[in-house]
Amino acid sequence: MSRPQSRGLGLLVVLAVLLAAAGCGRKGPPVAPERRLPAAPAGMSATVEADSIVVSWTVPRTRVDGTALRDLALTKLFRRAEAAGEPAKSAMVSRGEVVGWEPLAAIRPDAPAPAVMTGNTVRWVDRHGLTIDHRYIYVATVIDSTGRSSAPSERLAVLFLAAPGPPEALAADAGDGEVRLAWKPPAGLVDGSPLRGDISYVVLRGAGAEGALQPVQAEPATGTTHVDRGLANETTYRYVVRAVRKEGEATAYGEPSMVATATPVKRTPPAAPGNLLAIPSETLVRLTWTASASPDVAAYAIYRATGTGAFVRIGTTPAINIVFTDRDVKRGEQYRYAVTALDSARTPNESPQSNVVTATIP
């Protein structure tokens, strides 16, 4: 074969290879794989609760490029201890782990226990190897169904402050639409040391025998008493109190006190009925009056006195009635009458007496 023919054949082979390469794969510019990674968790927060650190964060619903994250497989939590003044250690992900950090949890969205997952928020209680007055740093990541991990969340630093013990001798005294609470400070901190720091108190309340307890005020109380107002009468309320210790920017919540219960009752009497009239006859005295102005009157009580004697209750009638007939009378006797209103409280409150009227039996 001549040299020109050989050279032409080689050019044809090269051209064929180039055409084959151009025809392979999808057209258009490639998308960088990292733009399709899940976004990092956000909203890292924590509270010190007695013997634990409760960490919460929000899992993402999108990827870094803004597209929806529909195949969330895991959310992971990592921790490391840092001494005061120690340089902050960066968090770098390699093969789904944060290098040099202790893995605490790998939480599946469809079976999060022992974590609690509400909507996009995850709550994890960390009790693993904690030491009082040590600083712990947390980061979280998420992983999709193909094993691709997000970047770590922002670092969350928590000082594991010694929490106060439970408040003592909680007492609840019911009033009219209110409960007055009083308690004693905790005996000390949970590590056995004396009570110290800025101590305040969170009062929690629940209605009935069961149900969640919720704080009754926006800010903790600074003293050891509290009056809980605006309550429903005849409803039993449960109370506990938790002590809160604050040192600098660190805060620790102690265990709750023993439960105290109280049932507010109405103690304000209704208004008195008025315009009492007595119409005697030979065998009876017919009484009539004007209804009390109070809306919660349940009944009226009728009182009678003979001559100058003391008043004695001789009967009651439902609030719908404003008449009463006294048939237990004797001819020639003189009687005095008065009427009061009774409300619907568990222990009824009684109004002052109406005007007094006199009737003589002919």
Image (spheres, grey):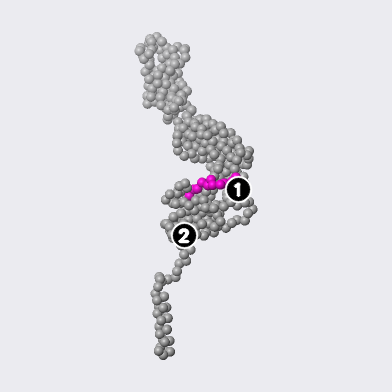
Say if the magenta span includes residue 123: yes
Question: Mark 1 falls on what kind of element?
Answer: loop
Residue at 46% across, 54% down: 74
Residue 253 percent location from the top left of the image: 56, 42
Taking the image as drawn, is residue 71 in sight?
A: yes
Q: Earlier in the sequence, mark 2 or mark 1?
A: 1
Q: Nearer the viewer, residue 11 or 271?
A: 11
Give the residue at mark 2.
148
Q: Position of residue 106 (x, y in %)?
A: 48, 52
Q: Amino acid at mark 1?
A: His
The residue indicated by pointer 1 is: 134
Residue in view at x 46 percent, y 57 percent: 143
* Magenta segment boundaries in residue numbering: 122-133
Q: Is residue 139 left or right of residue 86?
A: left
Label 2 environment density (alpha carbons within 10 Å; few <14, some 14–19, many ≥20): some
Residue type at numbered disc 2: Arg
Question: From the viewer's perspective, is residue 239 above or below residue 288?
Answer: below
Q: Which mark is residue 202?
A: none
